[in-house]
Amino acid sequence: MIDAFPLTREAALRRWREFLPRVTSYGARRNAVRPPHDDVSRLSPAIRFGLIRPEEIVRDTLDRHTLGRMEKWVQELCWRSYWKGWLEMRPQIWRSWRRRVHELHASLPEEQLARARQVSEGRSGVAVMDRFALELRQTGYLHNHARMWWASFWIHAERLPWELGAEFFFQHLLDADPASNLLSWRWVAGLQTAGKTYLVRRSNLERWCAPSLLADTTGLERLEDGCVTAFVPRDHADLTRHPLTVLGPFCPPLKGRTGLWVHADDLCLEDSPLASCQPVTVAAFTSLSTYRRLGLSEARIQSIHTALTDGLTRAGAHLGCTTLLRDTDSTAQGLAEWVKAERLDAVVALSPYVGPVADALPSIRQALQDMNVPLHLLRRPWDDTLFPWAKSGFFPFWEKAGRWLAFQDSQPCLNLG
Ligand SMILES: Cc1cc2nc3c(=O)[nH]c(=O)nc-3n(C[C@H](O)[C@H](O)[C@H](O)COP(=O)(O)OP(=O)(O)OC[C@H]3O[C@@H](n4cnc5c(N)ncnc54)[C@H](O)[C@@H]3O)c2cc1C
């Protein structure tokens, strides 16, 4: 099933070429949940790994259509950048979620933990929700609408902690993305936009689901309109906004032997500000022990491996240098050993986003500093432009992003970074 999702750049570009003629009907069809989900792009795992970039997709779209006509499609792509920018300015929300997951596993009554297991194993007793749980386990994907319904069912109907639902998604989604996942769960829970919760309703399911998904109506009475009422949990996160880390979009002049570190947050080095740097070697690191500790599904682990191998191979071919893919208990340790073995004077990389890769940055910096080797991180121009606008809600963000895109679109040459 993992093959249904593009996990190499070539496959991602192929999927995008196939989907491009269909973007004109995206706005009208995107809400319908009809496996195998041809009405939506299913590009999210590829976008999540940076095998294909949102700015490339927006550029191709605006080359053929006006922004006004394609607004819904472009907006959805921008939601992703919005969530990422929002979380970059509030990294503590990611850390607090990780802490809460630990605490909940240790402190929740066994009865509630057992119910959480039942619901996530597709044994809740509501047939359509159980189908979604199994679809996620079997394919590593759920349609956006199904994610919203299922998260709402978990939080508001089952009254289970949103943090554990987000953990289940994080372990199984091939596109698992700290920002989109956590902040969407918070949004459904009513924590992200004050006074707004998302409530699952039978009439809405009947309107948008393929009839086959509702053929078994077991338990559906629990979701009758008006039956599921809002259950807004306590917010354990500190929402203080911090300034974005200042990172240049250009590669600094480098002296001596430089190594390029490739990671799973951005796997298109040959089309990035690092495309013209001249490293002597490129490396990427996996950590099976960490993936297992986080409970990632085998399909998710395999997807990381496939995408990393593809990104690393392309980077090595483009830059004409040796590559190394190594499994290690800690990225900091792997990087330090690589720096030593290759006698490197500096390491460059595209900056990882808030999430597991960036969590390793403090220990990476320390390990490299101990060896007197600087680490240079760059942010892509697209992110550098959009992230600062993600200060508050999506619509103020979109006002600025939409205006910027319309301006770029009016220029003879579309320059999105
Ligand atoms: C509870 C919940 C959890 C989610 N977790 C994730 C996650 O971990 N990773 C993830 O990439 N998306 C997540 N989403 C957002 C959205 O569901 C997926 O991006 C989308 O379903 C991916 O399918 P697609 O590529 O076919 O989307 P399409 O409809 O074809 O959209 C194209 C691209 O636009 C972006 N996009 C579309 N809708 C959204 C959205 N609502 N929010 C953010 N980006 C969007 C994605 O990059 C997507 O690939 C979550 C949504 C909810 C409600």
Image: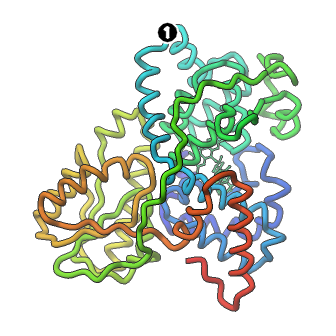
Closest to the observer, 315 or 272: 272
Quadrant where the C terminus sits is bottom right
Packing grade of label 1 (10 A; few <14, some 14-19, many >=20) is few
Q: Is residue 5 visible?
A: no
Residue 391: image location, x then y, percent? 61, 55
Q: Position of residue 292 (x, y in %)?
A: 35, 35
Which is nearer the eye, 125 or 4?
Answer: 125
Q: Is residue 206 visible?
A: yes
Drawn side of residue 223 relative to residue 242, left or right: right
Q: Along the horizontal axis of the image, is 94 left or right of 56?
A: left
Q: Amino acid at mark 1?
A: Pro
Between 296 and 158, the one lying in front of the other is: 158
Residue at 24% from the left image edge and 49% from the top image edge: 363
Location of the N terminus (image quadrant): top right
User: Residue at 35% of width from left, 47% of height from top?
Assistant: 359
Residue, disc 1: 109
Residue 46 image offset from top left, x and y in percent? 53, 59
Q: Is residue 156 above or below residue 270?
A: above
Above or below, comparing residue 9 to residue 37 in the picture:
below
**Percent coordinates x, y for residue 385 in the rendering:** 57, 70
In the image, residue 16 sits, relative to residue 149, either above or below, namely below
